[in-house]
Amino acid sequence: MIMEGMKKTYVVVILIQAIYAGMHLLSKAAFGGGMNNFVFIFYRQATATAFLLPLALFLEWKNAPRLSFVTFCKIFLLSLFGITLSLDIYGLALVYTSATLAAATTNCLPVITFFLAVLLGIEVLKLRTKPGVAKLIGIIICIAGAACLALYKGPHFRFHFSPFGHHHNVQQPHHLPTSKTWVKGCFLMLLSNFFWGLWLIFQAQIMKSYPSKLLFTALQCLLSSVQTFAIAIAMERRPSEWQLGWNVRLLAVTYCGIVVTGVTYYLQAWVIEKKGPVFLAMWTPLALIITICSSAILLDEVITLGSILGGMLLILGLYSVLWGKSKEREKTVEISSLPVEKESSELKEIVVTKSIV
């Protein structure tokens, strides 16, 4: 029974990373097919809202705490910066770069979040201890990996089996962004992760006053739908660009709205309950591996040596930070279990886990 439970956990965590890889691939395919990225993000959030809101109202409405005006304003701002701006910037960056880069920069999200937590005084970086040094080295390695992704390309690798890449190649004959466009896309991708990291940190504080997780998530989806619609209608007013049809656009919107936001929300919570957040974060690089292979074959993307090396550095930096955090947690458990340390541990669980909204 124990072995069966462990096998099930491994299957689920692999499925989670495969779902995220699919998100990068389908989003890139939709953009390559000519879909406006701002319109796509609106449809994605609207679909997520239509899926989550009825569930949240049915399951948590009766026992939900009172939503004060101050808390509502905080959630509105959290949705604006952590979801709306983060996803819109992510979409724009994906247009400029590739699905591989998007998956690679995902690996630096826990590191970025930890760095922001240190700046805000939530985390402490003890440089006189081995775990502290490991976390600092991890941050430096991640910076090096991001620089490698942005500034170095090297030899190109390409396959020719793409069912989705045909439309993409029509718009971009050489299928490889210019150096200036690529650097801009890398900067935007890191900026998107910066906003996402802030979202992870501040939502922990807001959830103390509004602990209904499903309603909290659904409300953020609803607010971000309104916000992304305002941005999309300002950026794109041609009716033809808002049409979905039975194509990759509809598939990408439905997949990201329901599978990524809905299914992965439950699966991640289940894995964290069984094995903890560090176990889940340790599997994050698998999404990069799946994306590299799939994007080269399905989207006919050019894979550069710089992307591979940069991704490897980001993975190495991620593991260095996670190792340092796990050692500090073990030491904390051995020393004492004060309430303050308990709250810090709960925050670390939220920070280290990638959000699915």
Image (tube, helix red, strand yellow):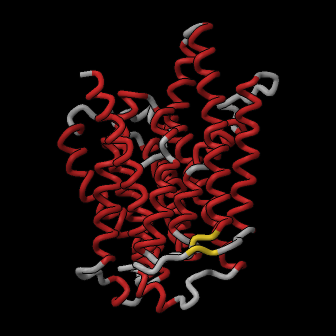
Residue at figure coordinates x 66%, y 29% from the top left: 324
Q: Is residue 86 above or below residue 218?
A: below
Name the one closer to the observer, 345 or 177.
177
Place of residue 240 in the rendered image (x, y in percent of width and height, measured from the top left): 34, 90
Quarter holding the N terminus is top left
Residue sitting at the far right: 128
Place of residue 124 in the rendered image (x, y in percent of width and height, measured from the top left): 71, 28
Q: Is residue 18 above or below residue 32?
A: above
Q: Is residue 293 above or below residue 162?
A: above
In the rendered view, does 234 fall on the left or right side of 201?
Answer: left
Name the one closer to the observer, 245 or 128.
128
Query: Total label count?
Result: 0
Residue at figure coordinates x 56%, y 40% from the top left: 201
Name the one closer to the observer, 181 or 319.
319
Residue at figure coordinates x 25%, y 82% from the top left: 245
Place of residue 175 in the rendered image (x, y in percent of width and height, measured from the top left): 55, 84
Name the one closer to the observer, 118 or 222.
118
Instruction: Please identify the quarter of the rendering in which residue 339 is found.
Output: top right
Q: Visible in this render: residue 130?
A: yes
Place of residue 304 in the rendered image (x, y in percent of width and height, measured from the top left): 63, 70
In the rendered view, does 181 fall on the left or right side of 33?
Answer: right
